[in-house]
Image: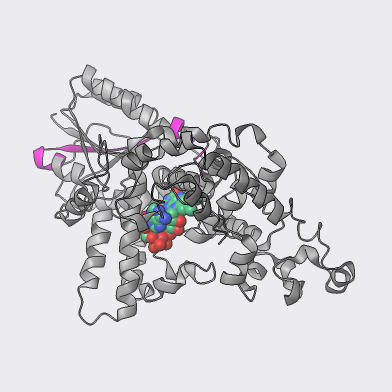
């Protein structure tokens, strides 16, 4: 039988799926999802990711069936799975989306390419994000992003199923893949139907609170679009989300507040690809500092006690610990709180971004390597091109949770702490602790370090490097490769004199 293989990866939908549409145009297709143990054994993989994928595959299976197709599920290394299939019944081509993933998926793609060449199987890859392969610099990137998102959505094609594989492999247990036991109880559920519902409620209603609602962890769960896991695992296509939002914005009756909210949302969809582009251009940033002049800054100072306290939500700073508690239960936290968590890890706790990033990758249901590692580095001050932002968890709590509703919800012991000590409970005198029944160091953690002093020392160490002329000299090259042409997109610092840079970095927001 002559047929082509459509290989589903992080694109679990039939709608606006170019590889599926193109392969189906040419004849019978075999739709394949290969669960690759080697990818699930990486330190960034989590049980919640696997469950979300399983839920999404259920929807995909139904969608394919409606089109006349069938999903074949295999467990194994992608090359082995393709080879087995090809030996059983040779296929004419492999169709998939491009993936800008972690190093393990990059290595897997390299081997698949070699296998395709050795077996004379053409592999056609399609863009699903506004990410450009082989890009050397960012000059025309924005125009290319626009071209992609404006182009027509791919229709869901009628399928002629290639009946080659008769049976599917059994779904492996999370335990057999070595995934850590914890899974957030209240995480978002996978699948296109859930993604579409989320999109609909955001466009028609919730976007009215986007502006002004996304920074506080109290309002963000409702005000943010909450589309990130559906974009990460491809239940929705970026292009369909952009086009749906633009259609809504074109409604003359749309209230101004909602229009402004959707404008803010649109710029973030742009950042989505802008950040993934960085990993596509330079895969090494998953493991190495974007600016190699920062090598050695934190590497040899690893403090396991600090890392463990952060993971356990026992840093002693209530807002930080409450965010960790929320993450454990929901698999999501808003941007500002993510940035604050990383800032606290990188500055007062002086932790390198890599172990913190591995842990957070598993906590975030929406883990997207390109966004994640770029943001980890940006918030840790190792890109060399971004203004250093250091978030003070006490100030963040005053600004975004002034009455303590958030910390009291996620840290029950804080419910007994009087308002006067809400932001710095460790300063409670012993008699107040006795009166309210909360012992600092037992019921709530004692801060690991003196926040002000540790932050000051950390900033001095980073600035000493940042202002080094040899390090500043490399900045222009990094900007050329990775910098946004829209400066507000990532708070880029212009290449300036070291003195001005150091001044700009004294932002303790
Ligand atoms: C340290 C750190 C790690 C992060 N890791 C991830 C990650 O692994 N996956 C991920 O999708 N986002 C990540 N983000 C970005 C951001 O926090 C999430 O995209 C956002 O909180 C998801 O919620 P939402 O879909 O409701 O966002 P919305 O505000 O509704 O934004 C809509 C979409 O735009 C994109 N987006 C939003 N903010 C950003 C941003 N700052 N940079 C790039 N894209 C953005 C996402 O795709 C998001 O779904 C990270 C941020 C930080 C500070």
| Residue name at image x 88 percent, y 70 percent | 434
Q: How is the image coloured?
A: one colour
Viewer-closest of 201 and 451: 451
In the picture, measured across the screen, residue 292 lies left or right of residue 437, that is: left
Identify whether 205 is placed above or below 315: below
Identify whether 324 is placed above or below 50: below
Q: Can the viewer see residue 61?
A: yes
Q: What is the x, y in percent for residue 114?
A: 27, 20
| Residue name at image x 38 percent, y 73 percent | 206
| Residue name at image x 76 percent, y 75 percent | 418
Q: What is the x, y in percent for residue 24?
A: 14, 42
| Residue name at image x 37 percent, y 76 percent | 208
Q: Is residue 126 magenta?
A: no
What quarter of the picture does the N terminus occupy?
top left
Q: What is the x, y in percent for residue 179?
A: 55, 39
In the picture, measured across the screen, residue 148 lies left or right of residue 298, that is: left
Q: To which quarter of the image does residue 239 belong?
A: bottom left
Q: Quadrant of ligand 1?
A: bottom left
In the picture, measured across the screen, residue 205 lies left or right of residue 139, that is: right
Residue range highlighted in magenta: 23-47
Q: Can the viewer see residue 41?
A: no
Q: Is residue 33 magenta?
A: yes
What quarter of the picture does the C terminus occupy?
bottom right
Viewer-closest of 257 and 484: 484
Viewer-closest of 429 and 93: 429
The outermost residue toward the left is 26
- Give the mark count: 0
């Amino acid at each position: 039988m002559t047929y082509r293989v459509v290989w589903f990866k992080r694109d679990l939908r039939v709608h606006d799926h170019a590889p599926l549409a193109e392969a189906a145009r040419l004849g019978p297709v075999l739709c394949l999802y290969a669960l690759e143990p080697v990818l699930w054994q990486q330190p960034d993989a989590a049980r919640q990711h696997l469950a979300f994928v399983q839920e999404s595959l259920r929807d995909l299976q139904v969608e394919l069936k409606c089109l006349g197709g069938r999903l074949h599920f295999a467990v194994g290394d992608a090359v082995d799975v393709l080879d087995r299939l090809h030996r059983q019944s040779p296929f004419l081509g492999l169709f998939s989306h491009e993936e800008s993933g972690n190093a393990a998926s990059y290595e897997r793609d390299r081997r698949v390419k070699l296998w395709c060449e050795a077996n004379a199987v053409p592999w056609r890859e399609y863009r699903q994000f506004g990410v450009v392969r082989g890009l050397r610099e960012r000059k025309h990137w924005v125009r290319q992003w626009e071209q992609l998102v404006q182009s027509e959505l791919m229709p869901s094609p009628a399928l002629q199923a290639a009946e080659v594989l008769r049976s599917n492999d059994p779904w492996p247990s999370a335990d057999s893949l070595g995934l850590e036991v914890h899974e957030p109880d209240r995480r978002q559920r996978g699948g296109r139907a859930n993604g579409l519902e989320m999109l609909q409620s955001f466009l028609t209603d919730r976007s009215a609170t986007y502006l002004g609602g996304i920074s506080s962890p109290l309002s963000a769960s409702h005000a943010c679009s909450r589309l990130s896991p559906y974009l990460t695992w491809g239940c929705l296509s970026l292009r369909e989300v952009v086009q749906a939002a633009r259609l809504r914005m074109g409604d003359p009756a749309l209230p101004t507040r909602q229009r402004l909210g959707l404008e803010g949302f649109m710029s973030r969809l742009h950042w989505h690809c802008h950040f993934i582009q960085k990993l596509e251009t330079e895969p090494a940033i998953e493991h190495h500092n974007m600016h190699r002049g920062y090598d050695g800054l934190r590497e040899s100072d690893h403090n396991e006690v600090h890392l463990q306290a952060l993971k356990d939500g026992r840093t002693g700073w209530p807002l930080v610990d409450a965010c960790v508690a929320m993450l454990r239960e929901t698999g999501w936290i808003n941007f500002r709180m993510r940035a604050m968590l990383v800032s606290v890890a990188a500055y007062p706790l002086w932790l390198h971004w890599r172990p913190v990033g591995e842990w957070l990758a598993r906590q975030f249901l929406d883990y997207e390597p390109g966004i994640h590692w770029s943001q980890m580095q940006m918030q840790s001050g190792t890109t060399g091109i971004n203004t250093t932002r250091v978030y003070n968890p006490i100030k963040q709590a005053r600004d975004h949770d002034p009455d303590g509703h958030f910390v009291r919800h996620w840290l029950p012991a804080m419910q007994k702490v009087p308002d006067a000590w809400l932001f710095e409970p460790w300063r409670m005198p012993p008699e107040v602790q006795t009166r309210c029944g909360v012992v600092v160091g037992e019921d709530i953690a004692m801060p690991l370090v003196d926040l002000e002093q540790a932050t000051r020392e950390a900033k001095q160490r980073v600035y000493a490097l940042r202002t080094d002329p040899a390090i500043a000299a490399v900045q222009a090259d990094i900007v050329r490769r990775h910098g946004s042409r829209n400066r507000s997109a990532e708070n880029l610092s212009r290449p300036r004199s070291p003195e001005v840079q150091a001044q700009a970095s004294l932002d303790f927001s």
